[in-house]
Image (tube, rainbow, N blue to C red):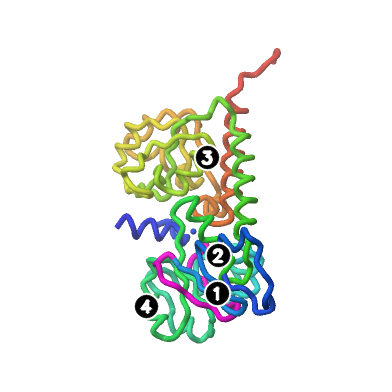
Amino acid sequence: MRKLVSTCLRSGWRGRGRTLPALLGGLMLAPLVAMAAAVIGTATAATVTVTDDRGRPVRFDRPPQRIVSLLPSLTESVCALQACGRLVGTDRFSNWPASAAALPKLGGLEDTQVEAIVRLKPDLVLAAVSTRVTARLEGLGLTVLALEAQSLPDTRHVLQVLALALGLPGQGDALWAQIDRRISAAAARVPPALRGQRVYFEVSPAPYAAGEASFVGALLARLGLGNVVPGALGPFPKLNPEFVVRAQPGLVMASAHDLTEMARRPGWSAIAALRQGRSCGFAESRFDTLVRPGPRLAEAADLIADCLVNLATLAKPATGSP
């Protein structure tokens, strides 16, 4: 159940994340790219083979031009690598950027539309490791690359492999470097008074929470924040509501809708952070950014930092006479 919830979150449901082009010919890769290729794939002038997160080699004779993505974080990664124009269809939860949101929708985790995918004639299908129709798609002759990030290092790895598969060697590392710099800049903006605060980050009102072992937990740690959910409970555990009350988090983060409902839950009025407004409620469209392990993690860091700066400003005592 926990694995299914974790996968659902990465897919965008909250109960609610390298081929070398033939034209390179005999050009030599830069040493750094060559070393990266040695780790995540092998390439010749005409072909490239990458290893996906199932541990299976996937070979490309040319860069794919008709791509179906079945995971929002992978959709967003393709677009962040400037290859959005190659997408011909996505899962129903892929809603960013606007060009991807307008593409044909091919179902979700439980109802992937295999026949519709086949009709699109993709030369690559991107999917999560846990996608149930992978074997069926491969049995129909489609190339499937299974990538599923569960941590910040995983996210970097996915960008590296995906860039190589798209014929964009080195661009995955370059994109991650940009993301990493922005996360560091967001961390520098976190008010000193709030650093080290223990966060309850709710991803679904069951309640499911983002624990220390999740990519959300890792992002919070990068921002200098703690987590009331220990890593031993898994990345996105379902919690006993009393656990949250007893934990007395210093900060509460959730979607704006779920945050407004929390105080009505039995016993949750005892959570001081809720009574005192030490909380961050994110609009639904922004909340997606926070729960997808993809290229918008830097934006997620900025959203959290913005909220914390605002909380610190509101907490400052007024100066001067009224």
Which residues make up the magenta segment? Answer: 53-74
Is 68 magenta? The answer is yes
Q: Looking at the picture, how far across and down is residue 283, in whole percent?
A: 55, 49
Count of marks placed on residues = 4
Measure the C-alpha gap from mark 3 to mark 1: 34 Å
Is residue 14 left or right of 281 when viewed as pictured?
left
Q: Residue furthest top?
A: 321
Q: Earlier in the sequence, mark 3 or mark 1?
A: 1
Measure the C-alpha gap from mark 2 to mark 4: 26 Å
* Callout 2–callout 1 Cβ contact below 8 Å: yes
Point out the frontmost of discs 2 and 4: 2
Point out the frontmost of discs 3 and 1: 1
Q: Looking at the picture, how far across and down is residue 301, in whole percent?
A: 57, 44
Measure the C-alpha gap from mark 4 to mark 3: 37 Å
Is 57 magenta? The answer is yes
What mark, if any, has residue 135 been given in the picture?
A: 4
Identify residue for label 1: 48
Mark 3 residue element? helix
Label 2 crowding class (10 Å Cα cut-off): few <14, some 14-19, many 20+?
many
Q: Residue 43's image quarter?
A: bottom right
Badge 1 amino acid = Val
Q: Looking at the picture, how far across and down is residue 320, in whole percent?
A: 70, 14
Identify residue for label 3: 222
Q: Residue at x 39, y 84 (%)?
A: 139
Q: Residue at x 63, y 61 (%)?
A: 170
Badge 4 amino acid = Ala
Q: Residue at x 47, y 79 (%)?
A: 143
Is residue 143 left or right of 297 when viewed as pictured?
left
Measure the C-alpha gap from mark 3 to mark 2: 28 Å
Mark 1 residue element? strand
Mark 4 residue element? helix
Q: Earlier in the sequence, mark 3 or mark 2?
A: 2
